[in-house]
Amino acid sequence: MKKFIRNTFALLLSGAMLVSAVGCSEDETSSYQDEADLVGNLQEEDMPYGATMTQIKPSQNDKVKIAVEYDYRFLTDEEAIKVSDYMAALGTGDAALMDATVYPPYMQRLCSNNGVSDTQEYIDLMRENLVNNYMGGEFEFTYVLIDEMVEDADEAGFSTLDSILESLGVGEITSKKLVKIDCMYSLEGDSGSYALSYRTGGNQAVYIYT
């Protein structure tokens, strides 16, 4: 009998890798209350991504390197942890973890396209780009927020990536998702906490394929 192995991989990080309170009248208050009641009566399955967020912390699960927050209706724990692993590998320069996170033939393709010989050189190149152009110093990722999912297939651009993966012999694809993430990080010698999106101008896109 032919044995099938199920693997989930984070495929690509793009982007950088390369409240006010106001007073209201009584009528306005009533209007906002009606709107709140309407939202409150929505069924969970009808709510958009982000309505039911949960998190996994290293203290709760020894498989998690960096705490990750996500909407459990749209992502499995395995998928969320895979995204966390990607950022942990980048944040710590861990080539072994990166190789376990990104589909190996795709990782080789990324290395080739960026003129480096292996995963470690690829990570070093990405970290150098972040330090020099965005962070301003050595950094460590401390929290991963998966705060958006792109559900339109055309917008996500799955067809292009599917073709690349098929040429790399990926086999049967059973699930594919595109999420947008933000990360909190700290800087060496600095007690502050910063958002990656603030430095880069937006969230980063990660493809998750099974």
Image: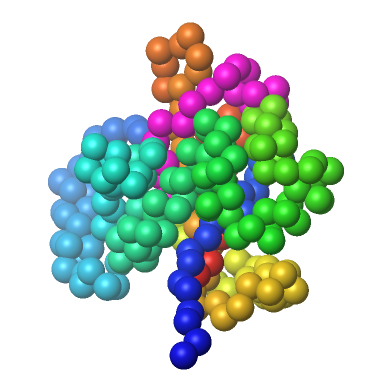
Q: Please tell me which residue is depicted at 68% across the width and 74% down the height of the picture.
A: 169
Q: Please tell me which residue is depicted at 73% across the width and 54% down the height of the picture.
A: 108
Q: Is residue 206 visible?
A: no
Tell me where the magenta segment starts and ends, as one range.
131-147
Q: Up-down: is 9 above or below 194?
A: below
The stretch drawn in magenta includes residue 144:
yes
In the figure, residue 61 lies in which quadrant? Answer: top left
Taking depth in this image into account, of 202 and 93 the one nearest to the observer is: 93
Coordinates of residue 13 in the picture (x, y in percent): 61, 49
Residue at the right extreme? 115
Residue at the bottom extreme? 1
From the viewer's perspective, tell me whether residue 168 is left or right of residue 74.
right
Taking depth in this image into account, of 13 and 151 the one nearest to the observer is: 13
Coordinates of residue 96 in the picture (x, y in percent): 56, 43
Q: Up-down: is 178 above or below 158?
A: above
Coordinates of residue 66 in the picture (x, y in percent): 38, 38
Q: Is residue 174 visible?
A: yes
- How many marks overall? 0
Taking depth in this image into account, of 27 and 37 the one nearest to the observer is: 37
From the viewer's perspective, tell me whether residue 113 is left or right of residue 171.
right
From the viewer's perspective, tell me whether residue 109 is left or right of residue 199.
right
From the viewer's perspective, tell me whether residue 155 is left or right of residue 122.
left
Coordinates of residue 9 in the picture (x, y in percent): 53, 60
Q: Please tell me which residue is depicted at 48% across the width and 38% down the height of the picture.
A: 88
Q: Please tell me which residue is depicted at 34% across the width and 40% down the height of the picture.
A: 67
